[in-house]
Amino acid sequence: MSKPLMVDARAIRKSFGANEVLKGITLQVEQGQVLCLLGPSGSGKSTFLRCINHLETINGGRLYVDGELMGFREKTDAIYEMKPSAIAKQRSEIGMVFQRFNLFPHLTAIENVIEAPIGVKGISKSVAIEKAKDLLASVGLSDKGDHYPAQLSGGQQQRVAIARALAMEPKLMLFDEPTSALDPELVGDVLDVMRKLAQSGMTMIVVTHEIGFAREVADRVVFMDGGVVVEDGTPSQVIDKPKNDRTKAFINSVL
């Protein structure tokens, strides 16, 4: 029996001016599934990820997260964009980790992690701090809570960013090339944290060039190019035995 859908994207289109970046993407992700999005730069992967939590407004199609239309209300055949406060509430249930760590430089690691639970969810400071300590421990940074971002390596900053996203208890985690800005020796620690998160049953969509990680952790791999889904299947189907020539060329270039 199939599991309920966490993400249901139907014919998603997105243009920037005359440039159509997403050309009718249809993609479903089940609850608890780990999906890795592969593809060359400019293929639309990051734009699609940003559409899922309405950081980018789609120009066509329908996008549902956990059964709820994302960013819009539907009334009699027409759809209307929701108010910013309503979108922010939807977005608070989706964690996102970016290429750049986007930590607040003037806050310590633990202050970065407690900021949203206190400010958005209204959790008491003492409860938020205890939870933040547990989260920092879970990403291997229990001794770095009072360090500022500038005192941390890139890999440590990215792990704080993951802890910060998890502090909101999201139902879905989006990762936009989370290791691409890191020195090679720091990549492994971040991927280890993501591996554990996948094992815990978190629904994850990961834009990545880390083919080894995709092969090992993903339930499904989707190869995108030119704003369309070119290939979709298990890691062994898409990475080891790709059918499409574009997929083959990309996998060979990355490996």
Image: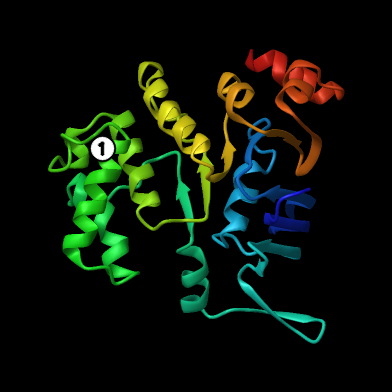
Visible residue check, residue 44:
yes
Along the line of sight, which residue is nearer the eye, 21 or 187?
A: 187
Name the kind of residue labelled 1 in the image.
Ala
x%, y% of residue 83?
A: 53, 80
The residue closer to the viewer here, 251 or 36, is 36
Q: Residues within 10 Å of mark 1 (few under 14, many from 20)?
A: some
* Res 105 seen here: no
Q: Is 177 drawn above or below residue 50 in the view shown?
A: above
How far across and how far down the image is residue 162, in percent? Answer: 38, 43
State the scheme by which the image is colored: rainbow
Q: Quadrant of residue 234?
A: top right
Q: Residue at x 49, y 40 (%)?
A: 200
Q: Which secondary structure lies at badge 1?
A: helix
Residue 220 picture location, percent across and down: 70, 34
**Which residue is found at the position 50% from the left and 64% from the top?**
91
Disc 1 target residue: 137
Q: Residue at x 68, y 63 (%)?
A: 64
